[in-house]
Amino acid sequence: MKIKLIQPAMLPRPMDTKLKTRMAPSLALLTLANLTPKDLPPTLEQSYTQPY
């Protein structure tokens, strides 16, 4: 079995910049990744990252 966790794009708050949302992602996925069994390492993907 494989586990893939996908971070969806977040709506920026009025005080956020694009750089801030990329540099400070939500900790929810990292918390879920840490709770998965050690024999099933998850793959983390961010859906909002785009090359410049």
Image (tube, grey):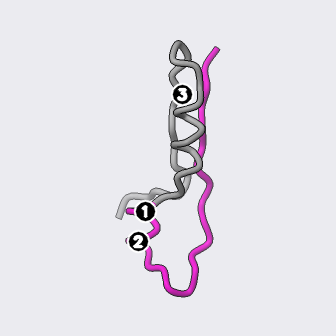
Is residue 12 within the magenta segment? Answer: yes
Say which amino acid is labelled 3.
Answer: Pro
> Disc 3 and disc 1: Cα gap in Å?
20 Å
In the rendered image, residue 22, in percent from the top left (x then y), is placed at 42, 63
> Disc 1 and disc 2: Cα gap in Å?
6 Å
Please name the residue shown 60% across and 31% down the image. Answer: 4
Q: Say if 47 sits above or below 18 in the image.
A: above
> Disc 3 and disc 2: Cα gap in Å?
25 Å
Q: Which of 11 and 31 is in front in this view?
A: 31
Q: Say if 1 sits above or below 24 in the image.
A: above
Does residue 36 appear to the left or right of 20 in the view shown? right
Asked if the residue at tag 1 contacts the one at tag 3, i.e. Cβ–Cβ closer than 8 Å, the answer is no
Say which amino acid is labelled 2.
Answer: Lys
Q: Which of 52 and 40 is in front in this view?
A: 40
Q: Label 3, on which residue?
A: 42
Asked if the residue at tag 2 contacts the one at tag 1, i.e. Cβ–Cβ closer than 8 Å, the answer is yes
Is residue 17 within the magenta segment? Answer: yes
In the rendered image, residue 31, in percent from the top left (x then y), is placed at 55, 42
Give the mark nearer the N terminus: 3 vs 2.
2
Say which amino acid is labelled 1.
Answer: Ala
Please name the residue shown 60% across and 43% down the image. Answer: 6
Residue 24, disc: 1
Q: In which quarter of the image is the N terminus?
A: top right
Q: Say if 2 sits above or below 7 in the image.
A: above
Mark 3 neighbour density, 10 Å: few (under 14) some (14–19) many (20 or more): some
Q: Is mark 3 on a helix, strand or loop?
A: loop
Q: Is mark 2 on a helix, strand or loop?
A: helix
Q: What stretch is highlighted in magenta?
A: 1-24
Q: Label 2, on which residue?
A: 20
